[in-house]
Amino acid sequence: MAALLPTASGTPAAATEIPVEPPAGMRRRRWIPYALLAPGLLWLGVFFVFPVFQLAMASLWDPSGSIETGYTFAWSFSNYADAWEMFHVQFLRSLWYALITTVICVALGYPLAYAIAIKGGRWKNLMLVGVIAPFFTSYLVRTYSWKAILSDSGPVVDFLKWLHILPPDGRLLATEFAVIAGLVYNFLPFMVLPLYASLDKLDVRLLEAARDLYHGPVRSFFRVTLPLSMPGVLAGTLLTFIPAAGDYVNAQLLGGPNTQMIGSVIQSRFLVVNDYPIASALSVMLMLTILVLVMIYVRVFGTEEVV
Amino acid sequence: MARRIPLSPQAQAVLAAMPSRRNVLRGALAGGAFAVAGGALAACGTKGTGGTAGPSAGPRCTTADLSATERKIAFSNWPAYMDEDEKNAEVHPTLVAFKAKTGIDVSYTADINDNNEFYGKIRTQLAACQPIDRDIVVFTDWMATTFIRNGFAAKFNPDKVATFLKNLAPTLRSRQFDPNMEYAAPWQSGLTGIGVNTAVAKEVRTVDELLTRADLKGKVTCLTEMRDTMGFMLMSNGKDPGDFTTADFDAALEKLKAAVASGQIRRFTGNDYVQDLAKGDIAACIAWSGDVIQLGFENDKIKLVTPDEGMMLWSDNMLIPVTSPHAANAMALIDYYYDPKVAAELAAFVNYVCPVAGAQEEMVKIDPDLAQNPLIFPNAEMQAKIKIFKPLTEAEEKEYTGRFQAAIGA
């Protein structure tokens, strides 16, 4: 039976006793792959393509409309200029925070993933559970608890003041530090897991070989370990950067009015101000910007496989 | 609705007034979850719901009133906004008495948590003149304005709401969005003032102190509700929030922006300023009366200050949707709650500003202390300081809210 199924390339498996002409039943089964694809495609069409199309349309509505009087479609590309004019600060800030977050997450996540994958031994699974454990609590609750930990009267601030790292009237909450710390905390697992997945596959005999060929630990890391874990680095950085750029919970809870990110702006334009054209324009801009940045990034650092 | 733990009746009453009454943040976050979906849905169906008629626009549909045969109504309200039996929170004594008196059965649900959210939920059906299975809904002034402007509110029959017309508190009688008291009956009102934690900083007397005093730098929060925060900015510029021009608004907004840029204002918040004020992370903030009174019960260092400039008063209003088939029953309920005795009973439980004249005298019989509380029954001195934000047209609403939101960083 297995021999009758086509392989990925569409030709029968290379076995000599298979006749050259495919049996009649096979042609009828050509629709099977499409049937299997259909639910997913339908889902994407209804819940992704259609909303994105609507969003793009809404970003070109006449801005003088309103919910009550109705909006009309008017090719108002000026919405994009207006949105940029009003909110470029928050826009650039979001990309900047996301970048810093990603860099810190690599710096923290790589050693952690390495330790778990290479040195974890019998504790490996337990350590992985430790990485995933925060997901057992809601994202919102965890961010709220950071608010309590970093509180002005809390132990962290007191300790930093005692060390004279913070001035006597200094604080952590409602600063950039708190927002980025929150982002790093919340997105670190997304960095660690793909890194772990690719480091776990690393054949340690390659490291031994590198040593035999007179590579020191530093050189064997950069010549062997890092290149082999690049798929993990790539996946991890994407999984961190993309959601971090659109995040608004951390900025809202841990930040102040001067550290808000573009997510808060889009949220408030949609739900509070009811300014759909500007909100849509900002959303489309954010999506396109991230798409372009990611494409360039994958082009430059890309590997053939992801994880 | 939160279950109550055994407490002194006073503390209970205060607690009842608090929890999620204006949980803006929760609304915002919940809203965030469906922001994309909501945006897309709105994108599909934005045909508009008719012109931007003024407050005088009449109801948009006519619905046959079945009140005489169907002795029931469905009442949607905010959580913790109704008296509860000591033993069973599901039992509301004033509603039980209403049924005994009129025979009308009230199905009461506390399912309104956010003005925008709830309005969004019922708007499309009302615009299509379809029933929403509710006979009374409760909206804050500004949302009530929109509701009435769109013709979604049924007009009261003056004969059926005579007690309401007689007993509505004088401050609320000629509100611009409902000058003839035809559509909106205040359920409860509340005050916005300055909350201070005197363990952290000495008392704050004026809005200017809040915005400029050096020892408060980075320890001040304001509210994300535009009317509350901007009302204070306008007052501190010597303008009346009930009557100002766009130039006045801009000047007031500049004042706010300066305080944001200087780092004086740490954050803009919904209900969550409560914890920060209690912990002492913030020293002073623009705050809602009920929240601060409750904190004061736990910590006597926390006080609600009436700034020299004044206080903002807001109300939540009962409105009858045009598609309600039980409008006469609903009017009977509205009228019932304007009986001073009933109003006092309710106020003793929820502790908000009571909109019913004569309830204070009735309150003396229930709890003399509460009767003297100017935050429940504003005295003459307090009355003189109370300001109400002017009603905005939809265009003004969008413009002002848009600029305010941009100034607070969102």
Image: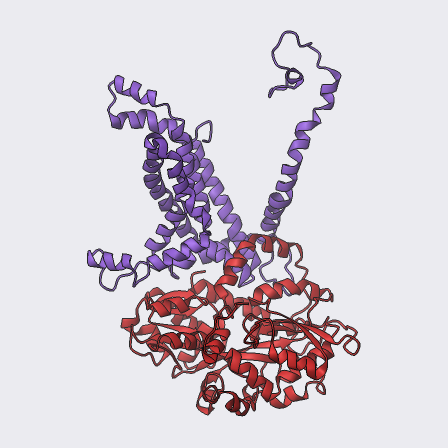
Chain colours: A purple, B red
Looking at the rendering, which quadrant does residue A71 occupy?
Answer: bottom right
Residue B103 visible from this viewpoint: yes
Closest to the observer, B316 or B384: B316
The picture places residue B208, in percent across and down from the top left corner, at: 35, 77
Closest to the observer, A232 or A115: A115
Residue occupying the point 59% across, 56% down: B38
Closest to the observer, B254 or A5: A5
Name the image quarter holding the C terminus of chain B: bottom left
In the depicted structure, whether residue B110 falls above or below residue A34? below
Closest to the observer, B41 or A206: A206
Residue occupying the point 39% across, 56% down: A145
Residue occupying the point 62% across, 83% down: B337
For the image, the number of numbered tags is: 0
Residue occupying the point 42% across, 47% down: A134
Name the image quarter holding the N terminus of chain B: bottom right
The picture places residue B24, in percent across and down from the top left corner, at: 49, 65
Q: Residue furthest top?
A: A16
The picture places residue B355, in percent across and down from the top left corner, at: 56, 84
B242 vs A192, left or right, is right
The picture places residue A242, in percent across and down from the top left corner, at: 45, 44
In the depicted structure, whether residue A228 falls above or below residue B341? above
